[in-house]
Amino acid sequence: MTRMLIIGPPGSGKGTQAERISERLGVIAISTGDIFRANVKGETPLGIEAKKYMDAGDFVPDSVTNKMVRDRLGEDDVDNGFLLDGYPRTTAQVDYLDGILADGGQLLDVVLQLTADDEELVTRLLGRAKETGRTDDNEAVIRHRLDLYHGQTEAVVAKYAERGILTRVDGIGGIDEVTDRVMQAIKEAQSA
């Protein structure tokens, strides 16, 4: 069983790599971003609330995100493991996730951090915005999201590094090349 997180700045390839890890390890990939976007598209109360934060490039409040993650991790399809993408983003969310896992007698096995240069990420995200028409991907919002990542999420990374379960992987390069690095890093982390 594998219980893991994938963390990285916006545009670092987390979603793509999460899908590939999910397929190769046979665990469910859970993306908070996908759940938020589905709620926005469906115009649910959560989606309406989340959209105002997403469009500004801000994090959706912990109260909304935490409940959603608790509910999702309570579903049967995560019994054989999971890969969380986009959560936790703050140290308060780390503590909340610790509580969810402790309630089930579980711990995280590995936290994978994809790393990439900010300018490369801005270029990637602007390209993605043109391809997909995402309203939350313009240069000002992208840079704001990167600032939030550096200001808040890096404290999350530091917490997991202190626990000895953080593995850093260079997210720059071809998709297959990055996947090979990711899978090797996971293998090494699990055998340590």
Image: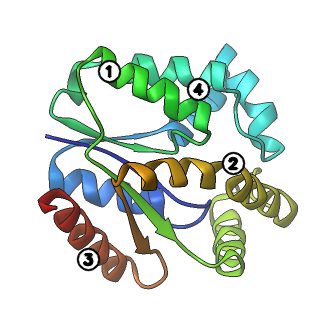
Which residue occupies 56% across, 31% down? 93
**For mark 3, what is the residue?**
180
Which residue occupies 80% across, 43% down? 55
Are dots 4 and 1 in contact, CB under 8 Å? no
Q: Work out whether 181 lies above or below 106.
A: below
Task: Provide the secondary structure element on which disc 3 rests.
Answer: helix
Asked whether 13 or 128 is in front, the reply is 13
**For mark 4, what is the residue?**
65
**For mark 1, what is the residue?**
102
Are dots 2 and 3 in contact, CB under 8 Å? no
Of discs 2 and 3, which sits in the foreground?
A: 2
Q: CA distance from mark 1 to mark 3?
A: 32 Å
Q: Earlier in the sequence, mark 2 or mark 1?
A: 1
Q: How many marks?
A: 4
Image location of residue 54, percent across then percent down? 74, 40
Are dots 2 and 1 in contact, CB under 8 Å? no
- Residue 45 figure quarter: top right
Q: Earlier in the sequence, mark 4 or mark 2?
A: 4
The tag on residue 152 is: 2
